[in-house]
Image: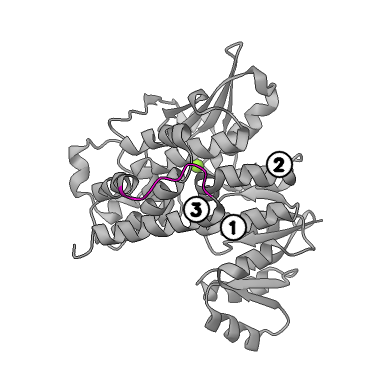
């Protein structure tokens, strides 16, 4: 039995991780969860997860409430609580499915405690890729991706050696506005932006898909997960989201991983590796119902944020942190209807110009750069 600590249990990936574990309860058990602010969900989980021992919630008051009502668990709160869960002794796999920058420090803790990592939190690699690399040198634990593209690449890389890889081809659906021109984007609504054509995901990632910020983050994520140079990572628009990504080898063989748009597949690959398990709760992909697959160029003119991946590749330092912090803040303002869709891009490009660049940042520098980027974006739109 593999024991799992799950950060972000109430989110989209967290919920699907619990579904996978329930269907394979002879292989996996969840021993600790973090739940953020969704305390109603926690009451359900106490019934659903029989092996649960430790719980982290965002607020201290919520913690006191649960401690009083259900005293048979260990409780933690806030960001310190996430670190405490990552640092628990008695578990095997650390599933990091929190959204945003706050995933970085717990990830570093879990690596330092030599845990196997299943990573859905891409921000930790976008912001702290170099720090994660350093931590892995001292504690060489495997990181299995929970991101459909990276799970695909991980599976395709099994078909050759690393020095035989010519390039990674990361596919992108193009997001909610892929058929809109730049002019059309000026007045799009939050509701339209949240309507992703293929995937049913959390709010931030759906908006990040529409701006292509998510794909830029995934290029950075691929670089750090697989140690492949940025110039060997291409993005290709593939509107059906059936090919989840590909690896082209030096002999021009291209290996692709295909499947339904169901995140439980990459979750199960990450938890189970090197084993595969059945998936009784879904049907396999039916090629005849798809008919045909399409591919288009991912243009930097149409999606200027995509180009930032390669800028981060060239400059590194705290640039990924500035971009991510600005994006997290701008997307939150957009979801509250305080700024327009195109203001998200403006926020990020302005933050890059205004937040000081640091070429070799420490963890403290990264935390401070994240804060500065957020403060900058909030001040940029004050009074809007
Ligand atoms: Mg993805």
| 190 to the left or right of 242 | left
Q: Which mark is residue 366?
A: 3
Q: What is the secondary structure assignment of the residue under circle 3?
A: helix
Which sits earlier in the primary sequence, circle 3 or circle 1?
Answer: 1
Q: At 49% across and 54% down in the image, what residue appears?
A: 365
Q: Which mark is residue 105?
A: 1
Within-10-Å neighbours for mark 1: few <14, some 14–19, many 20+: some
Quadrant location, the N terminus: bottom right
Q: Which residues are magenta?
A: 354-361
Marks 2 and 1 close (CB-CB < 8 Å): no
Which sits earlier in the primary sequence, circle 3 or circle 2?
Answer: 2
Q: Quadrant of residue 93?
A: bottom right
Question: What secondary structure do most residues of the magenta stretch adopt?
Answer: loop
Q: Mark 3 or mark 1, which is nearer to you?
A: 3
- Would you name the residue on which mark 2 appears? 137
**Disc 3 to disc 1, C-alpha distance:** 11 Å
Q: At 62% across and 54% down in the image, what residue appears?
A: 107
Q: How many marks?
A: 3
From the top left corner, tell me how far across and down residue 341 is, in percent.
Answer: 26, 50
Quadrant location, the C terminus: bottom left
Marks 3 and 1 close (CB-CB < 8 Å): no
From the top left corner, tell me how far across and down residue 138 is, in percent.
Answer: 73, 45
Q: Mark 2 or mark 1, which is nearer to you?
A: 2
Which sits earlier in the primary sequence, circle 2 or circle 1?
Answer: 1
């Amino acid at each position: 039995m593999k024991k799992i600590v799950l950060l972000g249990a109430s989110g989209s990936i967290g919920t699907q991780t619990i579904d996978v574990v329930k269907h394979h309860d002879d292989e996996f058990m969840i021993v600790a969860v973090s739940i953020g602010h969704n305390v109603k969900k926690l009451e359900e989980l106490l019934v659903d997860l029989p092996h649960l021992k430790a719980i982290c919630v965002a607020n201290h008051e919520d913690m006191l409430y649960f401690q009083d009502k259900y005293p048979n668990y260990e409780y933690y709160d806030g960001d310190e609580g996430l670190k405490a869960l990552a640092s628990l002794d008695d578990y095997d796999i650390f599933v990091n499915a929190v959204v945003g920058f706050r995933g970085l420090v717990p990830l570093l803790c879990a690596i330092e405690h030599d845990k196997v990592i299943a990573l859905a939190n891409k921000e930790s690699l976008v912001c702290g890729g170099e720090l994660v690399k350093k931590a892995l040198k001292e504690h060489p634990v495997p990181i299995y991706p929970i991101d459909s593209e990276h799970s695909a690449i991980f599976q395709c890389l099994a078909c050759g050696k690393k020095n035989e890889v010519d390039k990674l081809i990361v596919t992108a659906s193009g997001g909610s506005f892929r058929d809109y021109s730049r002019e059309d984007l000026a007045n799009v609504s939050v509701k339209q932006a949240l309507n992703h054509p293929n995937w049913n995901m959390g709010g931030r990632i759906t908006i990040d898909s529409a701006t292509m910020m998510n794909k830029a983050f995934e290029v950075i994520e691929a670089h750090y997960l697989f140690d492949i140079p940025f110039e060997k990572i291409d993005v290709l628009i593939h509107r059906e989201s059936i090919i989840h990504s590909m690896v082209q080898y030096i002999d021009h063989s291209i290996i692709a991983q295909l499947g339904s748009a169901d995140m439980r597949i990459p979750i199960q690959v990450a938890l189970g590796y090197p084993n595969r398990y059945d998936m009784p709760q879904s049907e396999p992909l039916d090629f005849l119902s798809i008919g045909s697959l399409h591919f288009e160029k991912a243009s930097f003119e149409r999606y200027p944020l995509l180009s930032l991946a390669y800028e981060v590749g060239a400059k590194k330092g705290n640039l990924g942190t500035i971009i991510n912090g600005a994006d997290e803040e701008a997307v939150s303002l957009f979801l509250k209807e305080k700024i327009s869709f195109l203001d998200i891009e403006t926020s990020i490009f302005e933050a890059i110009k205004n937040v000081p660049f640091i070429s070799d940042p420490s963890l403290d520098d990264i935390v401070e750069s994240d804060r500065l980027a957020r403060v900058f974006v909030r001040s940029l739109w004050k009074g809007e």
